[in-house]
Amino acid sequence: MAAPRWSGLMKYLPLLPVYAAYIILLLLGLYLPGMWQMVALVLFYAAVGQAFNVFIGMTRYVDFGYVAFIALGSYGMAIAISRLAAFPQLGVGIIAIGLILGVVMAVLLSIAVGGVALRLRGAYFAIATIGVSEGFRYFIDGAKIWGGSEGIIFSRQLKEVFGPTANSLSTFWADVLVLLIAIVAAFVTIHYMRTRVGYALTALREDEDAAKVMGINVTKYKIIAFVTSAAFAGLIGASAWALKTTYVFPADVFLITYTVEAIVIVMLGGAGTLLGPVVGGLVYGLSKYWLAIALPGYQLLIFAPALLVIIVTFPQGIVGVVKRKVKGTALERYIV
Amino acid sequence: MTALLRLENVTKRFGGLVAVDSMNLDVHHGEALGIVGPNGSGKTTLYNVISGVYVPDEGKVLFEGADITRVPIYRRSPMGMGRTFQIPRPFASASVRENVAVGAMFGSLADKLSVDQSLEMADHYLEVMGISEHRDKPAGNLTPVEKKLMEMARAFAMKPKLLLMDEAMAGMHPKDIDGIVSLMKRIQREEGVAVISMVEHIMRAVKGFADRVVVIHQGRKLVDAPTAEALSDQRVVDVYLGRPNVEESDATS
């Protein structure tokens, strides 16, 4: 009986380098003074990369409205804290409710968008999604829901409920939450890869018509990947955005820049690989952090041509290249 | 006995062109049927109606007695309908083994096979098709003949009751054709799969494989008879084959 269980576990070996990277980052942040901010930035980008990778990496469909899920997640947390501050006895429960609300809102939007737009192919899907995040932003503005263009500021309510610990919630625990989300996202990714979902997504990514003939309900599997990806985006928005900044303004959270950053991270690291978004997040986060110090204002000017170079010269990304290099060696089963 | 596949008065038009004209056809369990017709005869349209790419304008398609005329493509594979493409369509970045496993995983045994069992089944069919040594290569790196063999392995791993093959031998060397035809024939017999093979001009493939041949001309059935009889039918020879072709394939077999 032990053998099959062990071989079942072997399938999850590629999680080791991912989790090792996270542990090293965490330790660096905890024990080297002044490093936490940088570690938090890297964790944020790695988590965003992993969340986005489940969809863009595994299906190669590009969602230009992806930031809408992050935005809705942050609204979920903002609404939970601002409304539930009247019940301070709930304590940490308010944060949990905020996370759940953020996920539910992101998932509902993804079902609505995916159910319609994922019946479209490639480029048509990409075009359809551009409207989603912009449309939603103007809807909040115009319909004056959730504070309209003024957004929701909830730093006062956070202080009322948590008192002096409110500060560490924003500067430390929000980042730890992001790390936990990244850990779960990595697990879900490898789990998908090792089950029918992963095989179906690989097949439809390569040839959607042939996949249908094989008996794959391509729309169903695209929606599974889309909703999963949106759920993680909602969680990231609720923690890395709302909880960290203690405010939500539509003009800030519906920024297409985040979608573009997510695409860069996934492509740079290696779309559709498990380790790719972590490597991409690390490289992107670190270079953005240091460029902001060394050449403030020039980051985008450097990243835009860099993205072009990546896509032209090594479209499989860093991990894609490494994966090919280690094929046939002992490392093969760890790099996926 | 219910026919495995039955077409009842199937008509498919494109504007004013009647590509398939009130076609009736029965295919039985375990039968090897060749559908022969020149370019433009309506063969490909018929193929697309059977496999679900087109919905016919009139008539019905029945599979084991059930009306599948409007059943979406992806639901036909679990029912037991497999298909290969004229030009192989591998999932290029996935390994050969994974490609074949996808067939098993979503085919007629989809609910019964785990991922691991599907991979084992893939190994079996790669062995049968003689391409085991390539199993870990990306399918996109195979030679055209290997791709064809892989696609057949993938189709058989779907465990279909009916397998549709579109010009399976197009563009292949005669030497390869003979080998693949006898291999296909063997698997078809052993597994009791009904196969419909669409052929435009490679008669040696039809002769070596089909029990029965249907010749299509201008969207209609011209001849429906056992292979030897159908291919030597005077009408078929007149409209389509021409004598030298028949002589030639006789000489080599």
Image (cartoon, coloured by chain):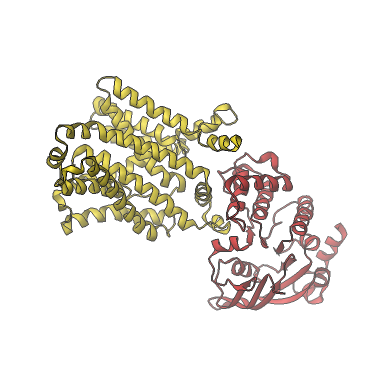
* Residue B16 place in picture, x, y as percent: 55, 78
Residue drawn 87% across and 59% down? B251
Q: Nearer the viewer, residue B169 or B149?
A: B149
Residue A269 in which image quadrant: top left
Residue that lies at the very extreme toward the top in this rendered image? A32
Q: Say if B72 sits above or below B106 in the image.
A: below
Q: Nearer the viewer, residue B12 or B65?
A: B65
Residue drawn 60% across and 44% down? B116
Residue drawn 73% across and 71% down? B214
> Is residue A307 at all visible to an observer of this figure?
no
Q: Say if B246 sits above or below B99 in the image.
A: below
Left or right of residue A254, residue A156 in this image? left
* Residue B157 place in picture, x, y as percent: 65, 53
Residue drawn 75% across and 66% down? B31
Left or right of residue A292, residue B186 in this image? right
The colour one sees for chain B in the rendered image is red
Residue B41 in which image quadrant: bottom right
* Residue B52 place in picture, x, y as percent: 57, 67
Q: Which chain is displayed in yellow in the rendered image? A: A
Q: Nearer the viewer, residue B10 or A2?
A: A2
